[in-house]
Image: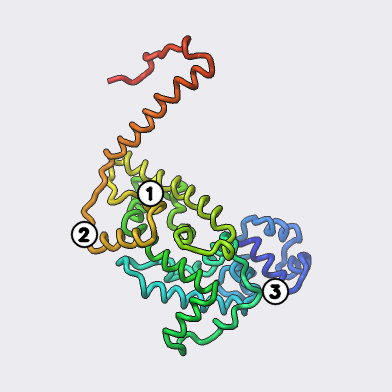
Amino acid sequence: MYSKAFVQLAMATLSCSQRELAVRLGVSPTQISKWKSDEHMSSEMEEKFRKIINIGDRDPSFVLLAGSLEQAIKWERLIHFLADLAQENAETGYDTYPLEDEMNLLCGTTFSVLEELGVVLPKEFPAELDFDYEDNDNEELWELIDLNSYSNLIYKIYDSLNNVYGFYAAYISELIDDEKLDLFDSPAANIEPCLMSLAACKIDEDSEFTPKIKEFRYRTKEEYKEWLTIVKDRAFRAGIPLKAELLDLVYASGDTLGQDAEAESMGINSSRLHPDIYMNELLTGMRIIHQVLPAIMKKLGIDEEFKLDTSELRLP
């Protein structure tokens, strides 16, 4: 997962060549080349890399993007501070698990999303944000966070994540965990790990600071439409009622998602969408096929000669 980042970070941190790194690790230069191409790296070798570059359990991609371990530590402090602030202001009734960062993924995921948005990170950590956060009153903190483009954007994403994750926890997580739906081996398994990306799609942001945001939104939403459709289809086949329209996660605003999650957490969401409602979707699809198929057959010149053989059809 991190093979390429480990090699790049080690060479930069140790100021060594690929051959020198290979000698230091006791492997061949060819193996280093394979890792640079993101070939799988064993957990034992990952530990060896972590020790020689002294990054602890940090994401090497995050440290690499930050520019150095020193810069990464400063970003890490800011990111965790903003995550705590966002959690304090959450109103969904659900804990925003990614912001708790129990798996040490928050920093790497945040920087990955910023990179995909086209945000150019500064070479040095913003000096105006380099202070002891506990020694400043709230008013000063909010002003500094709001004025700095990076901290402002990160906080907006985390605030949006509260709502997005709340909706996920309220209406989707149980379906993902349901063994009958067998979703862990399907693309739908990406729904939870990528929620920060979806949260970033729902914020208002200056396109000059995030030049790739339009492409990012389109790609992310298309992926989520595919993943959520898989969940809906399997729930329908298993006869499991849905508590909300799952595609709202894609189309609804962050505020709406937060309100829907809060209603479920308080037990005042009485709606249950029975799988039978999806018959309307099936009928709509059949009508479209009924309208389009004759035109296609005519275009191919087989409309007059075609005869339907019903012998192999399953008729009641």
- Compared across the picture, whether 56 is left or right of 312 comes to right
- CB within 8 Å, label 2 to label 3: no
Q: Amino acid at mark 2?
A: Ile
Q: Quadrant of residue 311?
A: top left
| Residue at the image position 63 percent from the left and 73 percent from the top | 122
- Image coords of residue 144 (percent x, y): 50, 81
Q: Quadrant of the N terminus?
A: bottom right
Q: Callout 3: helix, strand or loop?
A: helix
Which callout, 1 or 3, points to the residue nearer the camera? 1
Q: CA distance from mark 2 to mark 1?
A: 21 Å
Secondary element at image label 2: loop
Sort mark 1 into few (<14), some (14-19) or many (20+) by Cα contacts within 10 Å: some
Which residue is at 21% across, 54% downward? Answer: 270
Screen quadrant of the C terminus: top left
**94 or 237: nearer the viewer:** 94
Q: Is residue 33 left or right of residue 159?
A: right
Tell me the number on the disc at residue 13. Answer: 3
Identify the mark at residue 268; answer none if there is no mark: 2
Q: Is residue 123 left or right of residue 265?
A: right
Where is mark 1, residue-wise? Answer: 247
